[in-house]
Amino acid sequence: MNIRDIIEGKKEWRAHVARVKALPQDYQIVYNEMQRYLFKVGPVELTEGNGVLSGIVDLFEEGAASGRGVLEVTGSDVAAFCDDLIRDSKTYADLVQESVRQSKKK
């Protein structure tokens, strides 16, 4: 990763944060909790390109624009909603497990 990639990534993240701050307060609160949860679970493509977090903001922007409450968008079990979003995603824990399995085979 070179300096340009780092700068571009930082610009993209700042634009993403600005989109989140433009959401209604209840959406921001739920988004921040979801982000915290997802950072702990650790899907690999969480922030890359059009990753999970960008998709959540897209969904929240649509929900807010249509006048729906945030829990109407996610359902009452927000953690289950997050788990469904990343069900087929590779996590950092998966990468570590694969590495351990490969090292045992050697």
Image (cartoon, rainbow, N blue to C red):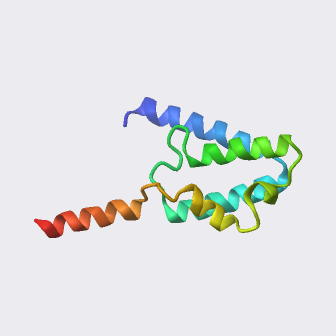
In the rendered image, which quarter is residue 70 located in? Answer: bottom right
Along the viewing direction, whichever of 89 and 46 lies nearer the viewer: 89
Counting the numbered discs, the total is 0
In the rendered image, which quarter is residue 31 located in? Answer: bottom right
Q: Residue at x 57, y 63 (%)?
A: 83
Q: Relative to residue 95, is residue 50 depicted above or below? A: above
In the rendered image, which quarter is residue 65 located in? Answer: top right
Q: Give the position of the N terminus as an image quadrant.
A: top left
x, y percent for residue 57: 69, 45
Instruction: Please indicate whether residue 59 sits to the left or right of residue 69 in the image.
Output: left
Q: Residue at x 65, y 61 (%)?
A: 81
x, y percent for residue 67: 89, 46
Q: Relative to residue 84, is residue 46 depicted above or below? A: above
Q: Residue at x 55, y 39 (%)?
A: 50
Instruction: Please indicate whether residue 95 sits to the left or right of residue 24 in the image.
Output: left
Q: Relative to residue 81, is residue 62 depicted above or below? A: above
Along the viewing direction, whichever of 56 and 19 lies nearer the viewer: 56
x, y percent for residue 84: 58, 60
- The residue sitting at the left extreme is 106
Q: Give the position of the C terminus as an image quadrant.
A: bottom left
